[in-house]
Image (cartoon, rainbow, N blue to C red):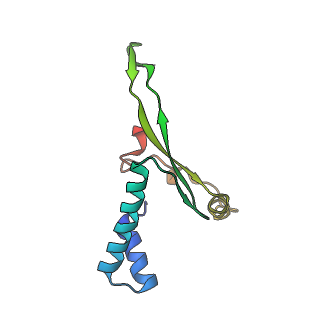
Amino acid sequence: MAMTKADIVEALYEKVGFSKKEAADLVEMVFDTLKDTLAKGQKIKISGFGNFVVREKRSRVGRNPQTGQSIEISARRVLTFRPSQVLRTEVNSSLAGKPIDPDSQHHHEDDEDDDNE
């Protein structure tokens, strides 16, 4: 199950003791700041967590795999996330000694954005 923005608000409310409205406003401000910064093409570095980087991709020729027809893929920006070593270590240590469950992996019907990239 994915953590939602509402879950983050709830966690902040429980751990810090802000009102739910204050917690929601704070979470919204953080995400707005992140979105505005990335929209300007700037990098975001969060120590102990990772880097969000906007990369420019040039237009290129691709092929429709069904028809083989050449099409132009337009220039665009892509957002990448590179986790810090601290985050990688923490994520992997939580798996220590546990088998990886293929059902908990990435591809579920409710992950609407994942297959579009």
Q: Residue at coordinates 43% horizontally, 25% vertically from top-left?
A: 59
Q: Nearer the viewer, residue 14 or 93?
A: 14
Q: Residue at coordinates 70% horizontally, 62% vertically from top-left?
A: 97
Q: Residue furthest right?
A: 97
The image shows residue 95 at horizontal and vertical percentages of: 64, 61
Quadrant in which the N terminus is drawn: bottom left
Determine which quarter of the picture holds residue 21.
Answer: bottom left
The image shows residue 43 at horizontal and vertical percentages of: 51, 51
Is 107 displayed left or right of 25 in the figure?
right
Is 19 displayed left or right of 106 in the figure?
left
The image shows residue 36 at horizontal and vertical percentages of: 38, 55
The image shows residue 29 at horizontal and vertical percentages of: 36, 68
Q: Residue at coordinates 39% horizontally, 49% vertically from top-left?
A: 39
Is 27 displayed left or right of 98 in the figure?
left
Vertical relation: 27 (above or below) 81: below
Q: Residue furthest bottom?
A: 17
Q: Residue furthest left?
A: 21
Determine which quarter of the picture holds residue 2.
Answer: bottom left
Quadrant in which the C terminus is drawn: top left
Q: Residue at coordinates 66% horizontally, 63% vertically from top-left?
A: 86
